Image (cartoon, rainbow, N blue to C red):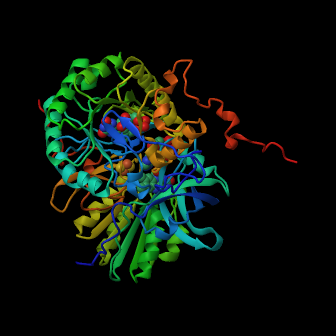
């Protein structure tokens, strides 16, 4: 079914800027930390699915690479101007440093980066699927979809309850919310894709939006495409620059012409059509990719 | 010092300050300012133009381009290291024809000074890429990436032997317009970098670009396997700066007149100054762009400041200044700590 996906913003991140923001708040929730920061000029331009990169450890830091975080919400707060929120899962040096910051600490931000989710031009039925902290950008997305009169059924899942994210916010903005955990500590015992299949079976769905770990995205895309439902997935690839200049963050994606190219997930993504990413080949250069060297025996 | 953000391309000609000549001659390549982007860290300039005016720096050195489109290596392609990173991109690119049509055309229309970096799997390929560029025109110089450790050439790179390096440079020289300056990009992973520099100069290079990345490796202790899909990768960033300064120093010492584009870990104007003093006629900024997208512009402004407070009135006076005789006639202020008001720090007096 043609649902008229709005053609979206310039792919060059032409609106992205670098600003010195300030931490307003760091809130712990389960295994995660929600950071609220001032980001004048970034917040105002952010569309759902875009991300920011954050400079680590101050000016003379030995961590020279910026870290990427999906923007979960933006606000305009009187004296602060634009502010934004992102959620941090402390998994390594940089993310642990971030979660130790306190109110008024400065933060070097670049954004908004990446291609956002494309939004339907009509009031259609959408399913949102989030895994772990991947549900963060779905909050802003759900708000935009509801503003357009869309039906929004949201599924969020994680391995265990403490790794679920965004339950309260997503309950508020979704038509329905389903929780799943793989260990059964909260919601339905199982995976998000089981819940997704149930919804796709029982009702007419126009678009599936998804963000989470790569294996989850692969299954979401597979299930959706098998039922001829349009899907958009926000991927997470290791990034050095986040602005399209280094070619670190590539993955194999099939183009309109049927040719596979290694596309940069920071500028040509992070949101890709689920039916276009060669999920099982991520991490490789699959045969037939444009420019793949033919190895001579 | 590195705090400035949203820097635009404005020159810092503060009112009342004496004029400063920032231009540099890198052999026959004349630049308005000595700051360039390093190949592979700025794509073809378009993305960076969003963060600063790319026409306000010395020029853009584009990502090394090969004859045909190239998919590059599998991922993961990078790993962060202390004050640096490893990369194993494998020269992903669209091929020289698409580059000429899209990237070069854009740079020309934008009015940016452009140094095209080229790569190849054989001397012939380098020659063919140069020939295509010669027909297209519209750029200021060629940088020949003979030192990329990522290109599979039975483990060898052209830059590690004087004869193979010279052969590539000769081929590129033959296939290029004789007025086009050619820079050979050298690898620091050699026993004697001066020998390589001398041989490429002999083969027709206008000058040398030093340094490319150093070969390194990281093992992921979770998977207990190499962190990069390509196993080894090129080390870049501030961690390698002392190696770069040493290479520039040695080449300048041995070849006083050879034009040098210095690079390797430059993160501030102070770092750039260090390379200039060691002998660089221009300085490229690479990995620092990933840390700060406006780094080239910021570093350019900082370098001008560093030179001014030391009493230089022309950039060229500072080039190789660390090699000067004790009885140098130039009156340069070496006791800058007394002069720089920003160093005054009385915060400890709390009243
Ligand atoms: C588009 C995008 C959106 C993201 N959104 C979020 C989010 O909303 N919340 C959140 O907690 N995390 C998010 N991540 C992942 C986050 O960027 C990494 O967890 C973080 O970079 C790890 O840094 P570290 O210093 O703690 O880990 P280290 O392992 O010390 O990092 C070392 C290097 O590897 C890179 N790296 C390591 N893990 C990842 C990863 N999973 N993805 C990308 N780069 C990685 C780092 O950037 C760094 O350069 C996102 C990643 C991307 C690409
Ligand atoms: C991601 C990445 C890609 C690079 N690609 C190239 C390239 O295509 N050609 C080249 O000559 N050098 C390439 N380099 C090397 C840089 O141009 C530079 O010589 C080196 O990184 C040292 O400078 P830096 O520490 O400022 O980055 C690359 C470096 C990085 C980090
Ligand atoms: S992270 Fe550098 S190109 Fe995407």
Residue A51: name its quadrant: bottom left
Q: Given the current orientation, which residue lies at the most extreme front position? A: B329
Expressed as whole percent of the image width and height from the top left, the position of residue B67 reads 16, 41
**Residue B312 shows in this picture:** yes
Expressed as whole percent of the image width and height from the top left, the position of residue A246 reads 35, 46
Q: Is residue B148 left or right of residue B126?
A: right
Q: Residue at x 18, y 43 (%)?
A: B133
Q: Given the current orientation, which residue lies at the most extreme left position? A: A297
Q: Residue at x 49, y 21 (%)?
A: B323
Q: Nearer the viewer, residue A164 or B279?
A: B279
Q: Residue at x 74, y 42 (%)?
A: B345
Q: In the figure, A158 relative to B233: above or below?
A: below
Residue A122: name its quadrant: bottom left
Q: Given the current orientation, which residue lies at the most extreme right position? A: B351
Q: Is residue A27 left or right of residue A264?
A: right
Q: How many labels sit on residues?
A: 0
Q: Is residue A164 left or right of residue B141?
A: right
Expressed as whole percent of the image width and height from the top left, the position of residue A97 reads 59, 46
Q: In the figure, B146 relative to B16: above or below?
A: above
């Amino acid at each position: 079914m043609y649902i008229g996906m709005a053609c979206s913003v310039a792919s060059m991140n032409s609106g992205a800027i670098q600003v010195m923001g300030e931490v307003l708040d760091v809130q712990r929730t389960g295994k995660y930390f929600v950071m609220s920061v001032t980001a004048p000029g970034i917040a105002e331009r952010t569309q759902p699915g875009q991300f920011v990169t954050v400079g680590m450890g101050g000016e003379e830091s030995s961590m020279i690479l910026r870290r990427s975080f999906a923007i979960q919400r933006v606000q305009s707060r009187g004296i602060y101007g634009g502010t934004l929120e992102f959620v941090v899962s402390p998994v390594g040096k940089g993310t642990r440093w971030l979660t130790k910051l306190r109110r008024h600490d400065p933060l070097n931000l670049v954004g908004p980066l990446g291609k956002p989710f494309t939004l339907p031009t009509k009031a259609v039925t959408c399913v949102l699927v989030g895994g772990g902290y991947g549900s963060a950008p779905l909050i802003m997305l759900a708000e935009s979809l509801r503003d357009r009169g869309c039906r929004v059924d949201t599924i969020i899942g994680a391995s265990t309850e403490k790794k679920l994210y965004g339950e309260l916010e997503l309950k508020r903005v979704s038509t329905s919310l389903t929780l799943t955990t793989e260990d059964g500590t909260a919601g339905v015992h199982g995976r998000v894709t089981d819940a997704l299949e149930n919804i796709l079976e029982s009702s007419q769905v126009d678009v599936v939006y998804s963000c989470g770990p790569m294996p989850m995205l692969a299954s979401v895309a597979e299930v959706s495409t098998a039922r001829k439902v349009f899907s958009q997935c926000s991927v997470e690839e290791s990034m050095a620059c986040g602005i399209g200049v280094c070619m670190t963050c590539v993955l194999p994606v099939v183009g309109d012409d049927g040719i596979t190219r290694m596309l940069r997930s920071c500028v040509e993504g992070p949101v890709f059509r689920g039916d276009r990413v060669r999920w099982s080949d991520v991490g490789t250069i699959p045969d037939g990719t444009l420019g793949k060297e033919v190895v001579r025996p | 010092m590195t705090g400035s953000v949203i820097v635009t391309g404005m020159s810092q000609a503060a009112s009342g300050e004496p004029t400063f000549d920032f231009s540099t001659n890198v052999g026959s390549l004349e630049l308005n300012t000595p700051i360039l982007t390093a190949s592979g860290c700025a794509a073809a300039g378009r993305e960076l133009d969003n963060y600063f005016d790319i026409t306000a720096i010395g020029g853009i050195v584009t990502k090394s381009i090969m004859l045909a489109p190239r998919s590059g290596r599998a991922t993961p392609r990078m790993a962060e290291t202390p004050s640096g990173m490893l990369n194993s991109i494998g020269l992903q690119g669209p091929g020289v024809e698409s580059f000429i049509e899209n990237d070069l055309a854009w740079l020309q229309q934008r009015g940016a000074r452009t140094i095209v970096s080229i790569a190849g799997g054989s001397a012939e390929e380098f020659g063919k890429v140069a020939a295509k560029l010669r027909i297209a025109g519209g750029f200021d110089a060629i940088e020949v990436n003979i030192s990329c450790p990522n290109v599979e050439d039975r483990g060898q790179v052209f830059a590690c032997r004087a004869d193979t390096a010279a052969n590539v440079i000769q081929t590129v020289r033959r296939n290029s317009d004789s007025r086009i300056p050619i820079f050979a990009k050298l690898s620091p992973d050699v026993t004697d970098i001066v020998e390589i520099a001398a041989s490429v100069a002999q083969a027709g290079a206008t000058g040398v670009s030093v340094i490319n990345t150093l070969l390194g490796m990281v093992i992921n202790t979770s998977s207990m396997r190499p962190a990069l899909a390509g196993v080894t990768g090129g080390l870049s960033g501030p961690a390698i700066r002392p190696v770069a300064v040493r290479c520039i120093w040695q080449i300048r010492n041995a070849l006083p007149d050879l034009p040098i584009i210095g690079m390797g870990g430059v993160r501030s104007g102070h770092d750039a100054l260090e390379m200039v003093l060691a002998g660089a006629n221009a300085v490229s900024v690479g990995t620092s762009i990933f840390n700060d997208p406006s780094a080239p512009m910021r570093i350019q402004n900082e370098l001008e400041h560093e030179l001014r407070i030391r009493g230089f009135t022309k950039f060229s006076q500072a080039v190789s200044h660390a090699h000067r005789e004790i009885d140098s006639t130039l009156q340069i202020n070496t006791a800058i700590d007394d002069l720089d008001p920003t160093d005054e720090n009385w915060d400890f007096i709390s009243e």
